[in-house]
Structure formats: structure tokens, C-alpha cells
Amino acid sequence: MRAQAMYEWIKAFHVMAVISWMAGMLYLPRLMVYHAEAQTGSIQSETFKIMERRLLKGIINPAMIATWVLGLYLAWSAFGFKGGWLHGKLLLVFILSGIHGMLVKHVRNFANDSNVKSPRYFRILNEIPALLMVGIVILVIVKPF
Ligand code: HEM
């Protein structure tokens, strides 16, 4: 396969992984808003636990790994890890990965019935991945610097 065609295939799979990761990063904190409003020990609360665990283990974690592996390949093969836009993008993706880590911790706390955060906290947390996505997509497509 030509190197260019190979690059385009990898980029296509990178974007598919990104869509899956972002879908979860936008939905999981929203689930937690409702979970934080539910009574501990209620049927709703137990159902949210299952939904959160499956979303995290089945979609968000594997999609994040695929996004990173494929993205790093693209950054290395075509750009040699150079470019202000790429460094800016990497910074924002590191922050997004940090939010991912916080969500893992919150899923664990909900599973142990030890969440102490309010619905308002999760509402605010829910906005951050959307804002990061705006910056990441502008950097990689417009490449302003
Ligand atoms: C995990 C670390 C990531 C790295 C190292 C990375 C790196 C890259 C690179 C080098 C490209 C190719 C750019 C080009 O060919 O002009 C690319 C494409 C792309 N990335 Fe990422 N990326 C990562 C994560 C993300 C995330 C989290 C998003 C969105 C939230 C994202 C969205 C995109 C999009 C939409 C494209 C296609 C751009 C185009 O074809 O013009 N990437 N990425």
C-alpha cells in the first residue's frame, strides 16, 4: 500500500476512535448529574452504576487508547512531532485525558456509594470536554500556528 493511502486509512480510524471517545466523554458526566440526584441504594442508582461501568469499560477506555495510538502514529509519521498547532493540540488532549482520569475515579466512587459531589459539579465537568473539543478541532484542521 502507498504510504499516503496508509496514512489516510490510519487517519480515518483515528477520527472514528475520536468520535467514540468524545461521545462517551460528553455522555458520562451527564449520566452522573442524574446519578448524583438519585437516592443511594435506589433502583435508579444501581442502574446508573451498570450504565456507567459499561460505558467506561466498553467504549470510553478502548476509544481513548485507540485515539492516542493512532494519533501519535500520525503525528510521528507526517509531522515528526513538530508544529505549534500539534503541541497545542497535545496539551489540550492531555487535559482531556486528565478529565478522563477524573471520570474513572467518579465511576469508582459511585460504585462504592461514596460519591460526595453535587449534580452542579457534574454539570460543570460536563462542559469541559466540549470546550476542549472546540480547541482541538480548530488546531488540527485550521492549523493557525
Ligand atoms: C491523543 C492524541 C492525539 C494526537 C497525537 C493526534 C494527532 C493527530 C494528527 C497528527 C492528525 C493528522 C493531521 C493532518 O493530517 O493534517 C490528526 C487528525 C485529526 N485529529 Fe487527532 N490527535 C489526537 C487526538 C485527537 C482528539 C482528542 C481529537 C478530537 C477531539 C482529534 C481530532 C482529529 C481530527 C478531526 C483529525 C482530522 C483532521 C484532518 O483530516 O484535517 N484528535 N490527529
Image (cartoon, rainbow, N blue to C red):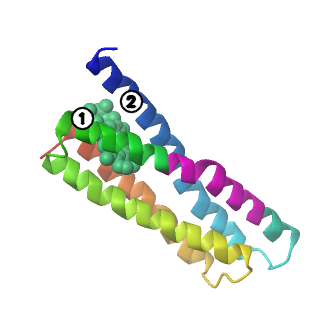
Q: Where is residue 15 in the image (x, y as percent from the top left)?
A: 42, 36
Question: Badge 2 is on which residue?
Answer: 10
Residue 62 falls inside the magenta stretch: yes
Image: 85 above or below 4 = below
Residue 141 seen by the camera? no
* Whether label 1 touches label 2, CB < 8 Å: no
Q: Mark 1 to mark 2: distance in Å?
A: 11 Å
Please, what is the three-letter code of the amino acid marked with disc 1? Ser
Image: 104 above or below 138 = below
Question: Quick check: 88 left or right of 125?
Answer: left
Question: Quick check: 25 left or right of 98?
Answer: right
Q: Where is residue 141 in the image (x, y as percent from the top left)?
A: 26, 37
Residue 132 seen by the camera? yes
Q: Give the range drawn in magenta.
A: 48-64
Mark carried by residue 77: 1
Residue in the image at 41% along x and 28% along y? 12
Residue in the image at 69% along x and 74% along y? 110
